[in-house]
Amino acid sequence: LVESGEGTRHEHYLKAGEVQNIHNVLFAFNKPTDGAINIGMNNGIYTIKTPFEGDFMRMADQFKGRVTKDTVQALMFRSLYNMSGTQFVFPEPAIKGKIDYVSNNDYKTKEDAALTVTVKSGDLVKDVTLIGGQGKTGIPQSFKLGDLEYTLIYGRKTYQLPFSIKLNDFIAEKHPGTESSYSSFESKVTVIDNEEKNTFHTRIFMNNVLDYRGYRFFQAGFEPDESGTRLSVNHDFWGTWTSYIGYFLLYIGLMAILFDKNTRFGDIKRKLDNVKRKKAKMAAGAMLLFGLSGFAQDHIHEKPTEKQIDSLLQKYKVSEEHAAKFGRVIIQDAGGRMKPVNTFSSELLRKVSKSDTYKDMNSDQVLLSMTMFDKVWYSVPIIYLKRGNDSLRKIAGIDVKAEYAALGDFFDNQGNYKLSKLLEGAYREAVPNQFQKDFIDIDKRVNLLYSALMGQVLTVFPIPGDANNKWISYLDAHTVNDPEIEKIKKVLPFYMQSLAESTQSKDYKLPDSLLEGLKKYQHTYGKSIIPNDDKVEAEILYNKYDIFKKLFSWYLYAGLAMFLFTIIKIFNSRKGIIVTVKVFHVIIGLLFALHTVGLIARWYISGHAPWSNAYESVIYVAWATMFFGLAFGRKSELTVASTAFVASMILMVAHWNWTDPAIGNLVPVLDSYWLMIHVAVIVGSYGPFALAMILGCVAMILMLFTNKDNKLKMELNIKELTYINELSLTVGLVMLTIGNFLGGQWANESWGRYWGWDPKETWALVSIMVYAFVIHMRFIPALKNFWIYNFFSVLAFAAILMTYFGVNFYLTGLHSYASGEVRTPYYFFWMALAVFILGAFSYFQYRKHFKR
């Protein structure tokens, strides 16, 4: 029997003498059963008797007939029967044989699964294979064993609601101008409750739950063609509130650890104050050394000299004043985000050339020049080349010492792309090697520059009346049949022509007026999605100062300088040295304030909390690390200096190639207040863990430089750092635990389940267990000493690295940013080796001078 229940084709085999329940309709073969569709066979003649009225259509000749209720009729093979809301076909007569199931050993597939069970009743034994699986309605298997009749099902269980829900409309909204990037989706439904005589209309969408009579309905998904919706259901009113109350009691208890004077946290603070008093009475000394550690466009056959190119570009250089006006024009990127041209031009120059300017032109001037003289820029050496890959330079035909290449260097005289063959293999690799990654990196820069020169990125024309608010470029304007587009598209080439003339006359009145006309058109037909002027201005300033990239070096210089003068202060406590240390302390505090302003600016520009993607989460971890470093290091210069160094290293990581600093749109599930609560807490916990890690390293380095002459001074410094380390770990563990449980609440509010063994959830739990062990090691006598605690506080940070980097970039799950795209840098292994070497040498020094 073949049927299409639930919208997909299913095959079923009816065995003589058995009854099957298929989508709540009983089918029986040679076993007369009341209420079932009975199929009979006697001497090769097949009959059908049903409790329903229906019809059939013979597929071969389209012959149609009626099926009469409770009447024995001839069964028509290869005919489509329709009765009781069910359509089915019997393709062939019954055959003698045995049904068997063979595993394909693919246990992750979403296809049907088979479960074989053994049923025992007294001395009788029967093996039964059930077809179903997670999220599927299983096929019931009915059989008799001895005097007992059984019906077994493998799959989801069907529940009958005490009310009904009718879908009136399903709406899937996309980001402006995109086809598959959804900003939100919702179901408009009517709840019909005959028992309570209650009918009402409501909406269900991500993070907005329908809660009625103890049932909670969640927007779980939708059909690929947007023809229907998928809701998940939860019915656990008392269980939910019992869990939530338990969670809040847990939060209160964990927070009490930080504020109750009688807890271990309070005891550590008192011990830290005692150490500080002792240090104030003596000139403690410490020595610490840090180890930093096909081209279709017509191209120029005779390549102009660099002098000729510079002369032309300088002659037609647009004024900064007019370029700034051009930079304020709004475009729509591929993800549907509306942003000023300045944002794209800044990203273009930084990604292609690794610089904010070219010669003496800013990014807006460069983009205008590219648009006016695209063929000239074909020969401009602006594509940055990493050191070390001589093969890349040889293929491009440029000097092996060249730092930049021109777009034309990557194409031969026939316009063929020189890298195409090498890229085919590189893109096929799941984990490309460094050689292949260099080619992929260059390919991305080449394509970005090419799209800019072709004008594909200048999507400045909103399509009037477009339902999805799509904007197009001049190149795409011919694809739209609209009189307004036909008028406005002529502005761009006229604008470029007048701009070239204005660079000579220095009179920009005409280009200025054309830009104003374009802006009026944008506001007329794209007003609903254009950002306001204040937000545009804020984004341009954000692009101009690129604060997070600059903070990396500022934190580094200030931290190292403060550290150096702190060491000098230990041996020489002159007033000038003390004042210098305080000055750098203040400078780091001001840098942190600037860091905070940068996060607030990004929040304002993007419209969402700045920790929603890889880049944002890293700069937020750097902020949290610096925050806790300043909080715990108010009277410890070593802590503040070390934290500034760690924050600079984290910001350096944020600007590696695997993170994209571009501001993007949120996926629907992240468009929630939970993003501010859960993500802020759990990612913020990485800050104190990073602080504890660096303090553990510093403490072990101090052990290395301990001798009998400075033993007492070193012991006080080691105690101070260890106590701050434990305070930091305690705060981090409290935040990570609360954040993990808040994540469970968010999951329950979004999908109706607390825990799904997602890699991020699992590794967050592993990190909680690891740090709980480190903090409680003091209860094990053999593990109760400063060296063991500091060493393990460093090792434990590997769990955080796995929770963040490992899950986000290597494993597949709901929290993965780019699974399979990142390969572990070799220096991580060297860093791990350095930690173990430091641990080994510091251990022998600790045993020699401190172990009692």
Image (cartoon, rainbow, N blue to C red):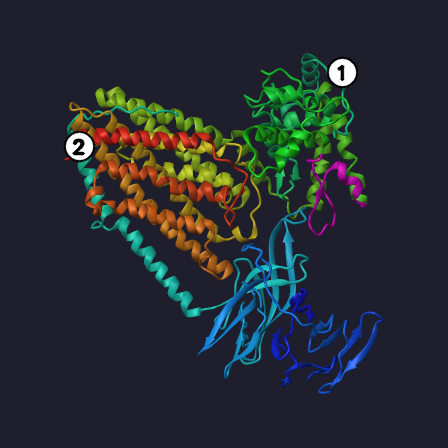
* Of the image marks 2 and 1, the number of the one nearer the N terminus: 1
Q: Which residue is mark 2?
A: 850
Task: Judge by depth and name the residue closer to the eye, 709 or 429.
Answer: 429
Task: State which region is magenta.
Answer: 456-482
Q: Amino acid at mark 1?
A: Glu
Q: Which residue is mark 1?
A: 302
Residue 290: name its quadrant.
top left
Please name the residue shown 31% across and 23% down the image: 289
Disc 2 secondary structure class? loop
Residue 206: where, in percent of width, then height? 55, 57
Q: Residue 449 got which mark?
A: none
Give the position of the C terminus as an image quadrant: top left
Task: Judge by depth and name the residue closer to the eye, 167 or 54.
Answer: 54
Please name the residue shown 62% across and 69% down the image: 98
Disc 1 secondary structure class? loop
**Camera-side mark, 2 or 1:** 2
Q: Residues within 10 Å of mark 2 (few under 14, many from 20)?
A: some
Please name the residue shown 74% across and 86% down the image: 72
Asked whether the residues under the numbered discs 2 and 1 touch, taking CB atoms below 8 Å apart as contact, a structural biologist would say no
Q: Amino acid at mark 2?
A: Phe
Residue 767: where, in percent of width, then height? 37, 46
Q: Is residue 178 above or below residue 152?
A: above
Residue 684: where, in percent of width, then height? 40, 44
Please name the residue shown 26% across and 30% down the image: 842
* Label tally: 2
Q: Residues within 10 Å of mark 1 (few under 14, many from 20)?
A: few
- For residue 103: magenta? no
View extreme (right): residue: 61
Task: Judge by depth and name the residue closer to the eye, 793 or 638.
Answer: 793
